[in-house]
Amino acid sequence: MKKIIVSSVITVALLLTIPTALAHQPRLTFTQDNTESILLTEIEQPDISKAYYGELKGKVDLYKFALETEQEFYFNILVPDIEGSTPNFSASLTLDDKKISTLNGLNFEWTKFYEKFAGDDYLKGPEERIVLQPGKYLIEISNPNDTGKYVLATGEIESFPLGESLRTLKELPTLKSEFFGKSPVTMFFNVIGIFLGIMVLIIAGLAVGTTLLIRKLKKRRHLAKKKQLR
């Protein structure tokens, strides 16, 4: 039984790191209430690959991050390839109110992009890699009407530790249903979903196995105490 538990733990660890290491860490900003003020989201570790799923609701969205050393920064703007999407978003990067760069989606030919690991379709807009100096930066996401769904991708270093994998599993149903308008079940119809589904089954099996092992050990101890009393 102990060998089974050890093997299961190793398998879970592999499932958590191998497939998801090929994807962006998802951040759902569209679920936050920004009806009264402009949404401001902090980008932690801007070199780590992340995807911010947002929605403009009559205002621009802002993202901030700080650099302590010179660093190359990557950012890209996309929209979900679903009915009603408008590929006209722009992302402006500023340092101390001074514009450094702009991803202008208005004068850009957006291309279809299929993300095979999550199984979703996008229209990919402008992207840029730029070397930035130390300082505090701000990214403003906008379009002519300041409405609609978008995705801001930042960073290029793939990282998916255990906690991030569990977070992804928790947020995938909301991402699929509320952002892409799909059934939450479709989260399992892709590479990440299949691996996460297997992970859930293994964890469930591990929990059952551990419970049975504990019961077995308690039963042995109980029988041993009975023999001692005779």
Image: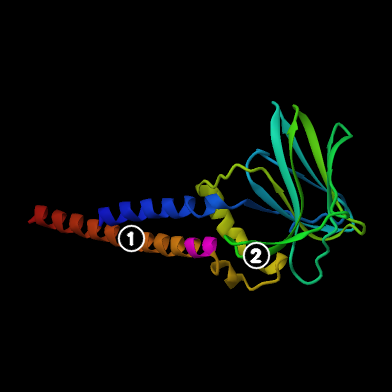
For image coordinates 55% across by 52% down, the residue present is: 22
Number of labels in the image equals 2
Q: Main secondary structure of the magenta part?
A: helix
Q: Is residue 137 above or below residue 230?
A: above
Three-letter amino acid code at the position of disc 1: Thr
Quarter of the picture containing the C terminus is: bottom left
Residue located beneath label 2 in the image: 120
Residue located beneath label 1 in the image: 211
For image coordinates 75% across by 31% down, the residue present is: 132
Horizontal side of 71 relative to 225 (left or right) equals right
Q: Residues within 10 Å of mark 2 (few under 14, many from 20)?
A: some
Q: Marks 2 and 1, Cα distance to the nearest angstrom?
A: 38 Å
Horizontal side of 198 relative to 140 (left or right) equals left
Q: Residues in magenta? A: 191-195
Q: Nearer the viewer, mark 2 or mark 1?
A: 2
| Residue 38, numbered circle | none
Horizontal side of 47 relative to 148 (left or right) equals left
Find numbered disc 2 in the image and state the secondary structure of the residue it sits on: strand
Three-letter amino acid code at the position of disc 2: Asp
> x%, y% of residue 198?
44, 64
Question: Closer to the camera, 183 or 215?
Answer: 183
